Image: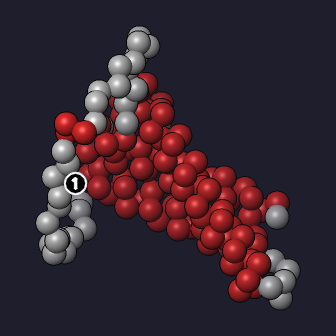
Amino acid sequence: MRRWFSTHVKRHMIRPIIYKATSRFAYLLCVALIWDRFINQGKQPIGLSLAFGLIAIGFLLAGWLAYLRMDGVSIPRLPARHKKKKKIDSLFGDMIDYVDEPIVEYADLEEDEQNVCLMLSDVLCAAVYGVLSLFV
């Protein structure tokens, strides 16, 4: 396992993993709390725990799909119906950063690195929601 991490996870991928995990965690935490407040309305005493458990299972499934994408399996996608608009680069200037290491965004990563980031962020969120479902 340690060898897999050393070969697949690079130092510049830590930031996108953390950003993906925190944003997904926050979005689905809001969804779970809204579900518990408006749909459940306190009828089930284990409602929030059940929601966190289901979210953890969903994250595990998403992590498994990302792992399969790393192996070369892809889900066929429907063709896009609308054309993408071209961005005008002259409106945006380059931001100069004087730090030694350049900041790498998720979109700047290669496809394999993006799949690794997605898989690890999904597994991280699944672990957090799994622990939360046990204690809530």
Q: Residue 71's spot in the image, x, y percent? A: 26, 51
Q: Residue 47's spot in the image, x, y percent? A: 77, 78
Q: Residue at x 18, y 45 (%)?
A: 88
Where does the C terminus fall, quadrant-wise? bottom right
Up-down relation of residue 70 to residue 39 (above or below): above
Q: Residue at x 37, y 55 (%)?
A: 66
Q: Residue 130's spot in the image, x, y percent? A: 67, 59
Q: Quadrant of residue 7?
A: top left
Task: Between residue 60 and residue 99, name the one nearer to us.
Answer: 99
**Relative side of 92 to 40, left or right:** left
Amino acid residing under circle 1: Gly
Q: Quadrant of residue 64?
A: bottom left
Task: Give the residue number, with chain letter if any, for mark 1.
Answer: 72
Q: Quadrant of residue 12?
A: top left
Label 1 neighbourhood size at 10 Å, few (<14), some (14-19), many (20+)?
A: few
As helix, strand or loop, the secondary structure at mark 1 comes to loop
List the single residue furthest toward the front.
91
Q: Looking at the image, what colour scheme do you see?
A: secondary structure
Up-down relation of residue 124 to residue 130 (above or below): above
Task: Between residue 96 and residue 117, name the one nearer to us.
Answer: 96
Up-down relation of residue 59 to residue 116 (above or below): below
Examine the rendering and report whether any part of residue 126 can be seen: no
Q: Residue 63's spot in the image, x, y percent? A: 45, 57
Up-down relation of residue 11 to residue 1 (above or below): above
Task: Between residue 47 and residue 16, name the one nearer to us.
Answer: 16
Q: Residue at x 20, y 39 (%)?
A: 89
How many marks can you see? 1
Examine the rendering and report whether any part of residue 108 can be seen: yes
Q: Residue at x 76, y 78 (%)?
A: 37
**Relative side of 45 to 116, left or right:** right
